[in-house]
Image (cartoon, coloured by chain):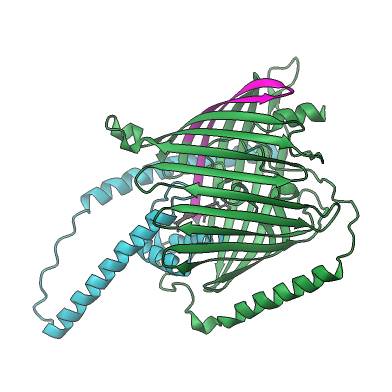
Chain colours: A green, B cyan
Amino acid sequence: MPDVQAATANLIPRLRICHGRGGSLPHRSTPPFLLCGSAVLLAVLLSILFAFPAGAQAPPNEEVKPVPLLTGSTGFITTFDGGEPHLHPIVTPLVLVPIGGRWIFETRATFETDMVQLPGRSAFHGTVAKEFEYVQLDFIANPYITVTVGRFLTPFGIFNERLYPVWIRNLQSDPLILPIGIGPSNASTGVMLRGGFRADPKFNINYAVYFSVLSTASPVNSDRFAGGRLGIFVPAARLEIGGSFQHGLQDERSNAFGFHALWQPPILPLDIRSEYARSIVGRGYWVEAAYRLSQVPFLQNELRRAQVVARMQQFFAGENASDALLPMNTKQFEFGLNYYFIDGLKASSSYGRQFSTDGNKNVWTMSLTYRFVVPLGHARSE
Amino acid sequence: MKWRYILLCMVGVTAGLTFSAIAQERANSTASSSAEAPAPTQGMPAAPPSAMAKSAADGAENGAQRLEGEKRFRTNCGRCHQTPHKFPPRVMATAIRHMRVRAMITDEDMRLILRYMTQ
């Protein structure tokens, strides 16, 4: 039964709630060299932090006082997975509270259900899953460093942190390798330092380093690990390449790593994204291209809102099994068509074919998603 | 069971918000098309020549910053999602602070984009 579930899990938009895995396994105490290494790292980071005192840089633009926001997204996703229909309503509210000139509190929760027809009944049934995806406090210390504490989306690869919300993703299904490196429930509990700065007139560097503690309180569980991600962005070419690394500090103390590349050729309305990830639970890659039809010479008003998408991916199961990943080698192709009505409102549809040793199948999806932004106070004046 | 009702209510509220957003969008687009060409500023006779030169220089600098802000907006704000529309200034200030943290936009990019998006 779990195998069947896992096999169907990846083409349908995966329920974001991951139930605790391995959380209760014992972990060994940290070896002295790691403690020493962490102390040195901390010392270096702290010295950078204080090397740019607050006064060196005026607080970020204070001409306009930011207002707390209720934002987030909502969607209704219908999937036909190997012929079986699934209805998937999802609401993801996000609250942003800016505090003073340098702080921001952010939290996002998800309420969703995957409704299917029970045998012999025509109505759809499902239970609502709810989760606090992240609850974090960010402090913009200086132009180079932002400190985050709390529960935050693990910055491993690009999908989890940047492309996950239903209003952003080009195809509603998750990449097969998404669960690699992001921890149970997609988040970490601990502290993170991150930032982006101009390293050279030609390129920017962005980085994130984090440490997460073990938490077994489902659904806000997390693993004990440390990791980082580094990206180089070339604005003139709109190209970013980067890599992620993570070292587990419990169980097998295994490592995971990944690479990502994003390119938006400046002369074309084209988005090319791809990711590779590898860990003991498996390895794989995805490559996605999305083309907005805004340069087509006819039906311009309609076609400029349409986007065609194609994605190809492959997953190779690793030596250690994980509930979140497929148990067998799998190849998958998807094609999609998106239509953007207005800022934030999108309709999308896709067709996918999955090939694996377990059999091949088709998956169709249709969805309507909307991103809302509501100020919790006066939006225009102070 | 209770959650299912809450979920349904939220979907309903969102549908309402969607329609209001569409309505607002329509209103905005008609307003902006009618306000597209601002009246050219006539010379201010009362201003002394030095002040005029200064304000012209300020204007040029503002224009350059605006252009640079627009360029940075185009380069940065459509990388992960579709480029967003302008929101009211205080909303934009929060969203851009959020994006600075999430998207690791540089300090300089953030200032220029915020200025461009709130003008």
Q: Position of residue A291 (x, y in %)?
A: 42, 37
User: Is A345 placed above or below A118 here?
Assistant: below
Q: Residue furthest left?
A: B45
User: Is A130 placed above or below B109 here?
Assistant: above
Quadrant hosting residue B1:
top right
Q: Is residue B104 left or right of residue B110?
A: right
* Magenta span: chief secondary structure: strand
Q: What segment is highlighted magenta in the picture?
A: A347-374
Q: Nearer the viewer, residue A62 or A242?
A: A242
User: Is A286 placed above or below A61 here?
Assistant: above
Q: Residue at x 28, y 70 (%)?
A: B62
Q: Position of residue A48 (x, y in %)?
A: 61, 78
Is residue B41 at all visible to an observer of this figure?
Answer: yes
Q: Is residue A215 magenta?
A: no
Task: Give the tally of numbered discs.
Answer: 0
User: Is B49 placed above or below A156 here?
Assistant: below
Q: Position of residue A191 (x, y in %)?
A: 70, 65
Q: Is residue A298 left or right of residue A235?
A: left
The N terminus of chain A sits in image quarter: top right
Q: Position of residue B7 (x, y in %)?
A: 63, 39
Quadrant hosting residue A46:
bottom right
Q: Residue at x 48, y 34 (%)?
A: A309
Q: Nearer the viewer, residue A225 or A134?
A: A225
Q: Residue at x 37, y 35 (%)?
A: A293
Q: Nearer the viewer, residue A80 or A263?
A: A263
Quadrant hosting residue B69:
bottom left
Is residue A155 at all visible to an observer of this figure?
Answer: no
Q: Is residue A365 magenta?
A: yes
The C terminus of chain A sits in image quarter: bottom left
Q: Residue at x 70, y 44 (%)?
A: A179
